């Protein structure tokens, strides 16, 4: 893949990467949740905003359209994702957006942004106390944070099935000892950590977001490329990976409704004191 010159790397690219082309196509659920979060914003249109965890830039585009006199920096730890975002957005919005490959726990900004927007990202971050300190430091005094990520109980049904299936003899050599790194915080813990970082006017809350898929094909593609790609990359044999997904799909077919994921979202709003 040709490197996009618009992207600055603050941290070296990670070896475990996303298939950004597939993610761009199948990330409809993340986009729909993000639009709801975006609807809570009240923008003048001239702010400088950070998109923390921009993915391939689908929501970044929509936020940029609400900032006709403003500017954005789009950050993602995935090199593939931030390169894809640059390909989708750089030419159209040149001069109003920059792209940075960086860890949101250690943002290379101090008192830069009027606001920080983030969806479907924070649960990938292992240290939320450090995360909120990093976000707080990147905001200007009086700046706002509006974010959403996976929250308490997120994907419980699916992950229980994954845990059981991972112990089966044919999968245990690859997944038997694997522990996912997601952090699905509850509202009270998130609020406490945000206040400890210095945020005020903190609001947090959980909401259910059950997400059905049209059928087995769509369900498996989403699991493979969005939810379980870190699990599946541990299985080198394609046939075994496909069988693992097939067995999960057979269980999901029996649910009501079938082929649905039990998502829970954690909403967060706060300000840095003026």
Image (cartoon, rainbow, N blue to C red):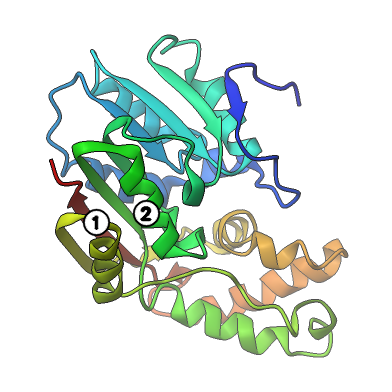
Q: Is residue 181 above or below residue 96?
A: below
Q: To which residue does mark 1 refer?
A: 198
Find residue 89 and report its horizontal and vertical position in percent.
47, 20
**Residue shown at 27% from the left, 61% from the top:** 194
Quarter of the image where one finds residue 210? bottom left
Q: Mark yes or no: residue 226 visible.
A: yes
Neighbor class of circle 2 (other Cα within 10 Å; few <14, some 14-19, many 20+) is: many
In the picture provided, is 145 more to the left or to the right than 101?
A: left
Q: Nearer the viewer, residue 176 or 204?
A: 204
Find residue 77 and report its horizontal and vertical position in percent.
57, 44
Viewport quadrant of the C terminus: top left
**Lower sequence index among marks 1 and 2:** 2
**Residue shown at 42% from the left, 71% from the top:** 184
Q: In this view, does 98 lie above or below 92?
A: below
**Residue shown at 36% from the left, 47% from the top:** 135
Q: Mark yes or no: residue 209 visible.
A: no
Element at badge 2?
A: helix
Quarter of the image where one finds residue 192? bottom left
Find residue 195 and report its horizontal and vertical position in percent.
23, 63
């Amino acid at each position: 893949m040709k490197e996009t010159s618009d992207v600055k790397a603050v941290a070296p690219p990670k070896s475990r990467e996303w298939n950004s082309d597939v993610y761009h196509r199948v990330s409809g659920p993340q986009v729909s949740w993000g639009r709801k979060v975006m609807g809570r914003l009240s923008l003048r249109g001239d702010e400088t905003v950070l998109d923390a965890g921009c993915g391939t830039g689908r929501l970044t585009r929509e936020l940029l359209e609400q900032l006709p006199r403003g500017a954005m920096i789009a950050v993602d730890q995935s090199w593939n994702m931030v390169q894809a975002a640059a390909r989708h957005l750089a030419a159209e919005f040149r001069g109003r957006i920059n792209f940075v490959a960086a860890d949101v726990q250690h943002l290379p900004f101090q008192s830069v942004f009027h606001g920080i927007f983030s969806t479907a990202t924070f649960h990938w971050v292992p240290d939320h106390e450090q995360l909120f300190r990093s976000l707080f430091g990147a905001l200007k005094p009086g700046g706002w944070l509006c974010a959403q990520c996976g929250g308490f109980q997120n994907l419980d049904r699916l992950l229980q099935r994954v845990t059981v299936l991972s112990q089966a003899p044919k999968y245990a050599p690859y997944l038997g000892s694997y522990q996912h790194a997601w952090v699905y915080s509850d509202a009270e813990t998130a609020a406490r950590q945000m206040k400890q970082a210095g945020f005020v006017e903190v609001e947090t809350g959980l909401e259910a977001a059950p997400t059905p898929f049209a059928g087995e094909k769509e369900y498996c593609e989403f699991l493979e490329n969005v939810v379980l790609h870190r699990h599946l990359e541990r299985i080198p044999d394609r046939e075994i990976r496909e069988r693992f997904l097939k067995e999960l799909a057979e269980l999901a077919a029996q649910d009501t409704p079938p082929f649905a994921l039990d998502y829970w979202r954690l909403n967060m709003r706060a300000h840095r004191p003026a």
